[in-house]
Image (tube, rainbow, N blue to C red):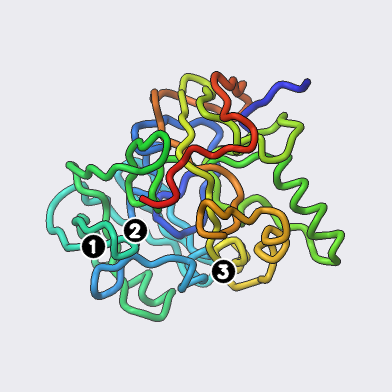
Amino acid sequence: MSVARVAALVQYPVKGLSGVPVERAEIGPTGIVGDRNFMLVDVDGAFLSQRSVPAMAALRAELDGDTLRLSAADAPELAVPIQYDGKRRDVSLFAKWFGQGVVQAAAADEWFSERLGRPVGLVRVTPEHDRPGWGVHQGQTGFGDAHALLITSLSSLDELNERITSRGGEAIPMNRFRPNLVVSGWSEPHTEDRVLRMSAGAVEIGYSARSIRCAVPTVDQATGRKAGPEPTRTLASYRREPAYGGGVSFGMKAAVLTGGTVAVGDEILVHDWIPAGTDPAPTTR
C-alpha cells in the first residue's frame, strides 16, 4: 500500500478569495496561520461569499509580513498595512454567529468595491476572537464557515472526475473544493470520511464532520464565473448525505488537536478510524 502524504497546502487569507498554495505552513488552533483571518462584509456587516458573489474567486490576497497584497487581472496590485486592532464593526456569518471585526484600510474597501461592483468592507479577526466549531472534534475557527481545516484526497477527486467524464462532462480541478490540505496515497476514494484522528508532520488533526457542499464548487476559480452544474450534479448521484439533510459531500471538516508545522510531502498517519458505514458527527450545530 502506498504511503499517504500531504500533496498540497492552501491558505485563504481573505474568506472567499483565491487560494494561495504554500509548501510549508504553521498550523494553529484555527487552522493554517493566517487562513481566513480576513473577510469582506456588506453594508450591514454580513459576510460575502462566492455563493452569491462568484467574482470573489478571481481576486487574490497574499500575506507579506504586516502587509496584505491585493491583486486581480484587471487592476494594479494594492498593498495595505494590516490593522490588528483599532476601529471595529459588527459582523455576522450565516446570521448565526455575531461578533466584531477590525476595520482595515479604506483603500482596501475601495479596491474591493470597485472590483465587485458593490460597497464592501474588509475586516480582520479581533485579537480576542474566540469562535468554536462543531462536530466530533469542535476546535476553533477564524472566519471560516465553521471549522479549522478542510481536507480532501486525490483519490476522491479521481473518482469524481471519472464519473463526470463518463457522463460527457469535463474533469474539474481540486481548487473547486477549496481545501486546506490535500492527501495523496489513499487508494480508496473518500478515505477521509473514515479518519477520526490523524497526524501530518507535527500536526494532529481530528475529524469534525463531512463537508456538505454548497454552490461554490460550481464556480470556476480562475475566472470567478459560474460553470455548473458540475460537480454538484454528479455528486448528487452518489454522495447524498441523509444525516445532513440530503446535501452532497466531498471532503471532511476537521479540528486542530495539536498545532505545529506541516509541509508538502509529509507523511500522513491515521491513528483512529471511524467504523465503516457510520458518521458520528451531529447533523446540526
- Vertical relation: 168 (above or below) 22: below
Residue 8 visible in the current orientation: no
Residues marked 2 and 1 touching at CB (< 8 Å): yes
Q: Residue beneath label 1, please?
A: 91
Q: Is residue 31 visible?
A: yes
Circle 2/circle 3 CB separation < 8 Å: no
**Label 3 SS:** loop
Name the residue type under label 2: Met
Percent x, y for residue 71? 46, 61
Residue for badge 3 = 224
Residue at (32, 46) in percent of width and height: 142
Quadrant of image for the N terminus: top right
Quadrant of the rendered structure where residue 247 is?
A: bottom right
- CA neighbours of label 2 inside 10 A, class few (<14), some (14 to 19), many (20+): many
Query: In this rendering, would 144 be left or right of 207?
Result: left
Q: Secondary structure at mark 1?
A: strand
Q: Residue at x 27, y 53 (%)?
A: 124
Mark 1: amino acid: Val
Residue shown at the point (55%, 67%) measured from the top left: 73
Mark 3 vs 1, N-terminal side: 1
